[in-house]
Image: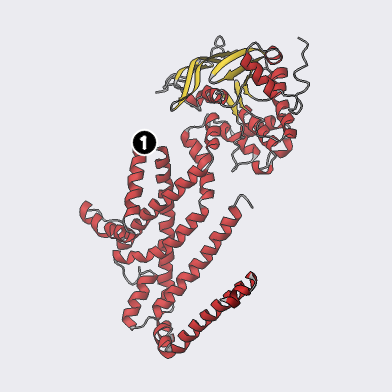
Amino acid sequence: MSALTPTFSSTEPPIRITGLHKSFGDNEVLRGIDLTVTQGEVVCVIGPSGSGKSTLLRCVNLLEKPTSGSIKLLGAEMTDPDVELNQVRTHVGMVFQSFNLFPNMTALGNCTIAQRKVLKRSKAEAEAIARKNLEMVGLADRMDYAPAKLSGGQQQRVAIARALSMDPKIMLFDEPTAALDPELVGDVLAVMRDLAQAGMTMMVVTHEMAFARDVSDRTIFMDRGVIVEQGPSAQLISNPREERTRIFLKRVLDPTHIADSELGETEPD
Amino acid sequence: MGILSSLKPTARQRLGRAASYAVGLLVILVVVLLADWPTIFKQFANVEVAAKMWPNIVLIALRNTLLYTIVSFVGGSLLGVLLAVLKVAGGPLGWFAVAFIELFRGIPALLTIFAFAFVVPIAFGFQIPGGAVGAGVLGLIVVTGAYSAEIIRAGIEAVPPGQQEAARSLGMTSGQTMGFVVLPQALRIVIPPMTNELVMLLKDSSLLFIAGNTIQTKELTSFARDALSVNANATPLMMAALLYLIVTLPLTWLSGQLEKKLDPKR
């Protein structure tokens, strides 16, 4: 019964999605997505609300069950009913818009529970790893705090540390800064940037165009369930080819929008 | 009419309140004056009869009531958690849980206790350990389990779905997610309604008389009822009522305190 323990080959890309469709009832949210993310690549997914970008991310680790198509994570076919989903998921960290920290545990407890119960690490080992990661996200002095006693930005950084404590090979971010007060966004983005520079394979759904442009290798623009356009981030954001991308970016980067005025004019090429 | 409508609204309100107080006071006065106090004291607060009840009404009857209540509550809560988890999980076992819950919520507790005491032993040739009391308590456990299952299920569903998603994304199995993440939060949510369930159970323990009892196994209500027949005097009932209140009032108060303490808005 220990069927199909995934074999992680270094030749396979971390994420390979082909022909992905997802419907909720009559509503087809994803209409044929093909996407490959290579080792160490940082991919940002942008697009209007309802474009299917969050659903795409949630399909990657099968929090949403695809209607059809194939999702290969680290060589394991996620849509195969025999695949050890829980085992593959330990290699895929996920960070949510609403943090979803466990309120009945401290920051440290949030970072150790899955290490202990899923990876069967000893208490000492799990706590050492959790401490290291909480220090990395700048919360060494908040380890024993309950989530309710932390600010949104701190909670999200604990959530990142929690995911990192599983030693993931891939990190998924679902609008990680969308629920934060503006002045707290920077701390979270800085942690994500450090992670990207350390070589983590990342897929980030975001509205932070500056982050997409400066940090990610590639940006994907989605609308109505399809990938409209993709390319190197700086190029796609400053010089999109498609009309739909241009309209969306213009709306997002509207001069009246805070801190976006410099965005449209930077990048001489 | 003309005088009333000429008053300010606040003045009219004050007048209305004074009038209702006056009527209430009058009713009490009439009752007090018409009541036959010597008979009332003799029948309901008879010191002689009360002295005969003492101390067994506390040492045996109240003790048994508390014992049956606590055992039924612990057993019923555990059964309730199990049924709630099965129902939420769905599948064949989920259907079993639904059938179980609906069956025992739909039948009067009295009949369930009766069934465990008399029908089960006849139908299955199986004597429930603990005799009549054991069978009765088992019936109460089953009824409490069915009711608390619905309370706990509501608690489980009140935990935001993002909690499960976070746990599953870390590779936890559905069982680990339930045990370490969802249930601890759900149980905190259901403390107030479960305290209420405990108060109800304390009173429902009086239904155990249907299973039959001995002098040593009587709980408060049976004890008081039997004493009522023996003495042809209602004082034991009054004593029992007082003893129930002595236990339930602090419990109700405690439930209110817990509710306040656990309110996230505070």
Q: Is A263 in front, or is A1? A: A263
Around disc 1, counting alpha carbons within 10 Å, would you say few (fewer than 14), some (14 to 19), or many (20 or more)?
few
The front one of B213 and B196 is B196
Residue shown at the point (53%, 82%) measured from the top left: B25
Residue A181, can we see it? yes
> Would residue A94 appear left or right of B134 to someone viewing this image?
right
Quadrant of image for the N terminus of chain A: top left
Q: Residue at x 49, y 58 (%)?
A: B195
Dividing the picture into quadrants, the one containing residue A141 is top right
- Subunit under mark 1: B
Q: Is residue B219 left or right of residue B5?
A: left
The image's colour scheme reads: secondary structure
Identify the image quadrant of residue A196: top right
Q: Is residue B4 above or below residue B101?
A: below
Q: Which residue does the image show at 35% across and 59% down from the upper left?
A: B137
* Location of residue B10 by image quarter: bottom right
Residue B40, percent from left and from top: 42, 86
Residue B109 in the image: above or below residue A187: below
What secondary structure is marked by label 1? helix
Q: Residue at x 42, y 74 (%)?
A: B240
Camera sees residue A14: no
Please give left or right for residue B54 compared with residue B4 in the image.
left
Q: Which residue is mark 1?
A: B91
Q: Residue furthest front?
A: B2
Q: Position of residue A5 (x, y in %)?
A: 47, 19
Looking at the rendered structure, the kind of residue marked 1 is Gly
Percent x, y of residue B166 = 56, 33
> In the displayed structure, would residue B74 be above or below residue B32?
above
